[in-house]
């Protein structure tokens, strides 16, 4: 029997995740020394020095298994958010949280509702578990919560609300979310994917922790240290929800999926107020700079609340991305979301943003 014949039907049909090119690939293949990656919304500052020191100190313990409950980290987070430690689960990146939700709650034929162009892992989780994704078109670039209400049926098990939305950085407000909750049944799991929460500047962004406490729906908030914490390579994120929901997820989580170094790094980041402040400041300045440059180049873009901008180049995005790579700049083509003339660019450091604009000027 061939190995393919042994595969579960859902796995056979699975489309692989297509990561963007890495800095190492581009350096090696094109022989370019100065490559910037503005495709994955990583921290523009590189890793925090405080985190690096903490990692160095922890190296002596890596022969030991990590604490499978991330107790100390959950205590730190609980203190920061004013919640109980049993309302927290740490995961191997926010991605693992999404897979745990799928493992716990999705069976063949269940429906998952998400906004158009949503984060790729939602689709992968649905496909792996035999669920069916129901995609709701965006309304003027925003998640259309009104329209989503109409898509919720008795088969709906999970609703993904990505806020800020990836790939365009738009948000919905606390009031909009309350309205949405008032119109849908209590049963589905509502995932508030707040991977980019820390970059939001708007005042009416949802207070998801308040809703978790006060609302009767099964709400879970996803957060990650990959973006604001500058540690995408360490793979650590977490979920906040009522204890009953957290307990379900713990049942299916492999015991040591959050490694020792990641736990230590996340704890160090939580006290590194300066890094966080500098990264947010860089994001604010970078956003203003890029908006100015896009205006000057007559390119339209969607106003963002995250650390990336969705820009309309009015040209074939794949073609432009290919040329940008030749200039040592990696960005994400909008084609993967069916937005053929858009690219998503991470807001980088001052130097990286300038390199992007110089390359775009040359190409366009
Ligand atoms: C919207 C969204 N959610 C979740 C994640 C998962 O992040 P990570 O697994 O790195 O914590 C990402 C990563 O890019 C994302 O963009």
Image (cartoon, rainbow, N blue to C red):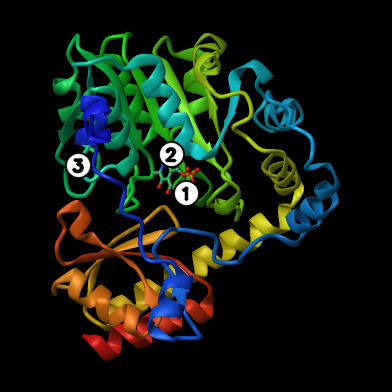
Where is 319 relative to 238, above or below?
below
Q: CA distance from mark 2 to mark 1?
A: 8 Å
Circle 1 SS class:
loop
* Apparent side of residue 162 relative to residue 45 in the rendered image (left or right): left
Q: Earlier in the sequence, mark 3 or mark 2?
A: 3
Q: Earlier in the sequence, mark 2 or mark 1?
A: 1
Mark number displayed over residue 200? 1
Rendered location of residue 339, percent (x, y): 16, 58
**Residue depicted at 26% across the width and 31% down the height:** 11
Q: Quadrant of the C terminus?
A: bottom left
Out of 301 and 53, give the one closest to the viewer.
53
Label 2: which residue? Answer: 205
Badge 1 residue CB within 8 Å of ligand 1? no
Q: Quadrant of the N terminus?
A: top left
**Residue depicted at 33% across the width and 84% down the height:** 326
The quadrant where ligand 1 appears is: top left
* Apparent side of residue 158 relative to residue 152 in the rendered image (left or right): right
Q: Residue furthest bottom?
A: 362
Q: Which of the 4 quarters of the picture holds residue 127?
A: top left
Q: Is residue 84 visible?
A: no
Where is 297 relative to 112, above or below?
below
Q: Is residue 82 visible?
A: yes
Q: Label 1: how many residues lie within 10 Å, few (<14), some (14-19) or many (20+)?
A: many
Rendered location of residue 336, percent (x, y): 21, 55
Q: Nearer the viewer, mark 3 or mark 2?
A: 3
Badge 2 residue CB within 8 Å of ligand 1? no
Q: Earlier in the sequence, mark 3 or mark 1?
A: 3
**Residue depicted at 65% across the width and 30% down the height:** 81
Q: CA distance from mark 3 to mark 1?
A: 21 Å
Label 3: which residue? Answer: 116
Q: CA distance from mark 3 to mark 2?
A: 20 Å
């Amino acid at each position: 029997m061939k190995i393919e014949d042994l595969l579960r039907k859902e796995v056979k049909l699975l489309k692989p995740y297509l990561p963007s090119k890495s800095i190492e690939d581009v350096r090696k293949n094109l022989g370019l020394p100065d490559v910037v990656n503005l495709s994955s919304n990583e921290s523009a500052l590189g890793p925090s020095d405080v985190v690096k020191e903490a990692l160095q100190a922890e190296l002596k313990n890596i022969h030991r298994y990590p604490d499978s409950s991330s107790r100390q980290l959950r205590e730190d987070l609980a203190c920061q958010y004013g919640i109980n430690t049993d309302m927290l689960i740490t995961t191997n990146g926010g991605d693992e949280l999404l897979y745990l939700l799928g493992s716990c709650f999705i069976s063949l034929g269940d429906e998952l509702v998400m906004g158009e162009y949503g984060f790729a892992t939602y689709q992968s989780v649905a496909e792996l578990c035999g669920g069916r994704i129901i995609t709701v078109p965006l309304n003027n670039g925003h998640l259309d919560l009104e329209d989503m209400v109409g898509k919720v049926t008795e088969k709906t098990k999970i609703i993904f609300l990505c806020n800020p939305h990836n790939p365009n950085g738009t948000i919905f407000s606390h009031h909009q979310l309350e309205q949405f909750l008032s119109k849908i049944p209590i049963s589905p799991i509502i995932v508030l994917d707040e991977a980019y929460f820390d970059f939001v500047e708007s005042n009416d962004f949802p207070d998801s922790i308040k809703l978790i406490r006060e609302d009767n729906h099964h709400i879970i908030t996803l957060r990650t240290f990959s973006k604001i914490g500058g540690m995408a390579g360490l793979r650590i994120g977490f979920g906040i929800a009522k204890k009953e929901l957290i307990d379900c997820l713990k049942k299916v989580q492999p015991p040591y999926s959050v490694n020792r170094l990641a736990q230590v790094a996340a704890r160090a980041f939580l006290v590194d107020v300066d890094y966080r402040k500098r990264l947010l400041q860089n994001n604010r300045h970078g956003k203003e700079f890029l908006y100015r440059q896009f205006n000057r180049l007559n390119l339209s873009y969607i106003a963002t609340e995250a650390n990336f901008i969705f820009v309309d180049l009015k040209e074939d995005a794949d073609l432009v991305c290919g040329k940008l790579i030749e200039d040592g700049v990696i960005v994400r083509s909008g084609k993967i979301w069916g937005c053929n003339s858009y690219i998503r660019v991470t807001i980088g450091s001052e130097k990286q943003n300038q390199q992007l604009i110089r390359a775009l000027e040359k190409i366009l």
